[in-house]
Structure formats: structure tokens, C-alpha cells
Image: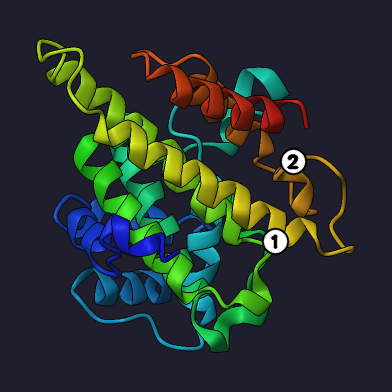
């Protein structure tokens, strides 16, 4: 089954949305991420992309280094208290500006990742994906919708022979679609309860897609561990963020789903949380 077409894949929708909201001061913040080293070169590269130029292939050090550093920013300080991280380590913008900055950086990184000439330059995309998903949720329904379309496009570009990260793209889509479904159910709460829930059907198909992609990689004897999904990769720096979003959206949803949908979402959620 061709799952991706259901989500109207788009290479550009998310970047267009972000360009309208990311201003020069935000680009300057990204350019300074490496202690302002080569600031002017990084800023020049970022301005070109912001103005509509494509990233060079292969991606050069400027702006790759500051994009990767910005990816680790935490606009809501989720980890400072838990991991006793010094606040001086996380000086970036907070709230909506911080999430716009991080989403912009993650979007450019993932666009670069899927280019064949860049494949050996990146690893651990699951961290970039979940940082983008988290920021998209903070930025709201329009950002989440554009991110779903972008991640669906990314899946189409990731070759099957390099499939370790593919399930994480799909899991990101699932989390975003659940978030979007919650918003739509709030708006439509006055409609007849027996109305056909097409969104639940879509979520069930998406659950099948996630499990299919995970199983394909699981059949590879080289996976690091037996843990569901998270055990497919050695790159675990943002696994706690995957667990946090999974708990919030699949296990403790604000708006209830149909009984069957709840059962499948809980199965996936608990499988990930128990890893």
C-alpha cells in the first residue's frame, strides 16, 4: 500500500510556512550557535536559503554545523531540571520564537539528509525528527499539518536500503496526526456521535504503517536491541523526547478516540514506553 500519498507529501510546504515567520534576528541566532565562529559565513548561507535558494549539495560546513547545534536547543527547558544542565548551555530563544528557530534548523537538516550525496554526512535522524515534531506541536495546527506533509515527502526520499530511520519518520507523522485529530474533535464535538469517524480510520492505517516499517527493520539482525522502535538505533540522545510525546499523545490523549483506535494507539505507545 502507498501510505505516503494519503498525507499529500510536500518538500516545500513547511519551509514556506517557516520562512514567513522566521526573521533575520532568528537567522542571526542560528548563525551564532557555534560560539559565533564563522558567524558571517553561516549567516550568509542561511540568508540565501531563507530567500529561496536551495541548500548546496553536498551540504557545506556553513551552515551545517550551526543547524546541527541549533537542533539540540530546548525552547521550553525540558531537560535542564531533569539532567541538571547548566542554563548557560541553552541560551537560545524560548517559547514560540525558539520553536520557530529549531523547526527551521531541523527542516533544513532533514532536507539535506535525504540527498544521496549527503547520506554519509549525517546519522541519528530520529533526534532531528522528534525535535521537529515537538516544535511543530508547540507551533500549532498549521505547522503540524505542514510538518506531516514534509515528513511524508521525506519518507518517499529515504531509500529502502537505508531504512533504519524510516520508521521514525512515520512515527513522527503518527504523533502529529493524533495531535491534529484532537484539535478537529474539539471543533466537531457537537456533531452526531454516530457520524463516521474517518480520522480514526486514517489513524488505524497509520498505525499499521508504523508497525510495518518497524518490523521491516526489526528483521535485520544488526539492530542494537529488542526494544520496540527505539531499539533500532544507537543514537538515543532524544529518546526521552520520543517517550514524552508518546505518553502525552498516545497514552494520555486530551480527546478520546474510538475504542479500537485507543487500543492500537495504546499498544504502540506502551511498546515504545516499555523500551
Q: Nearer the viewer, mark 2 or mark 1?
A: 1
**Quadrant where the C terminus lies?**
top right
Check the image and report above or below for 120 versus 178: below
Check the image and report above or below for 81 versus 28: above
User: Is residue 36 visible in this depiction of the protein?
Assistant: yes
User: Pointer 2: residues within 10 angstroms few (<14), some, or many (20+)?
Assistant: some
- The residue at which mark 1 appears reads as 216
Q: What is the CA distance from the residue labelled 2 to the residue labelled 1? A: 12 Å
Mark identifier at residue 37: none
In-image side of 256 versus 252 (left or right): left
Q: Residue at x 63, y 61 (%)?
A: 165
Could you say which is closer to the camera, residue 190 or residue 144? 190
Could you say which is closer to the camera, residue 30 or residue 208? 208
- The residue at which mark 2 appears reads as 228
Q: Residue at x 76, y 54 (%)?
A: 233
Residue 257 placed where, x, y %?
37, 19
Check the image and report above or below for 271 versus 101: above
Residue 128 placed where, x, y %?
54, 53
Amino acid at each position: 500500500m502507498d501510505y505516503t500519498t494519503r498525507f499529500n507529501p510536500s518538500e516545500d510546504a513547511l519551509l514556506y510556512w517557516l520562512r514567513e515567520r522566521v526573521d533575520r534576528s532568528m537567522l542571526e541566532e542560528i548563525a551564532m550557535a557555534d560560539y559565533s565562529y564563522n558567524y558571517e559565513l553561516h549567516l550568509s548561507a542561511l540568508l540565501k536559503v531563507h530567500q529561496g535558494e536551495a541548500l548546496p549539495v553536498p551540504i557545506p560546513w556553513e551552515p551545517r554545523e550551526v543547524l546541527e547545534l541549533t537542533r539540540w536547543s530546548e525552547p521550553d527547558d525540558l531537560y535542564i531540571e531533569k539532567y541538571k544542565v547548566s542554563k548557560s548551555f541553552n541560551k537560545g530563544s524560548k517559547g514560540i520564537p525558539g520553536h520557530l528557530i529549531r523547526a527551521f534548523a531541523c527542516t533544513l537538516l532533514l532536507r539535506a539528509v535525504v540527498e544521496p550525496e549527503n547520506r554519509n554526512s549525517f546519522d541519528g535522524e530520529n533526534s532531528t525528527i522528534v525535535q521537529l515534531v515537538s516544535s511543530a506541536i508547540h507551533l500549532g495546527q498549521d505547522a503540524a499539518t505542514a510538518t506531516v506533509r514534509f515528513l511524508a515527502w521525506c519518507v518517499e526520499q529515504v531509500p529502502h536500503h537505508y531504512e533504519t530511520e524510516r520508521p521514525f519518520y512515520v512515527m513522527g507523522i503518527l504523533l502529529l496526526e493524533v495531535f491534529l485529530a484532537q484539535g478537529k474533535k474539539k471543533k466537531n464535538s457537537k456533531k452526531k456521535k454516530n457520524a463516521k469517524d474517518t480520522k480514526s480510520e486514517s489513524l488505524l492505517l497509520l498505525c499499521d504503517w508504523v508497525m510495518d516499517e518497524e518490523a521491516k527493520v526489526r528483521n535485520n539482525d544488526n539492530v542494537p536491541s529488542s526494544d520496540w522502535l527505539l531499539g533500532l538505533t544507537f543514537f538515543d540522545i532524544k529518546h526521552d523526547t520520543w517517550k514524552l510525546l508518546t505518553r502525552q499523545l498516545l497514552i494520555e490523549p486530551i480527546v478520546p478516540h474510538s475504542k479500537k483506535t485507543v487500543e492500537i494507539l495504546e499498544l504502540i505507545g506502551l511498546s515504545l514506553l516499555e523500551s
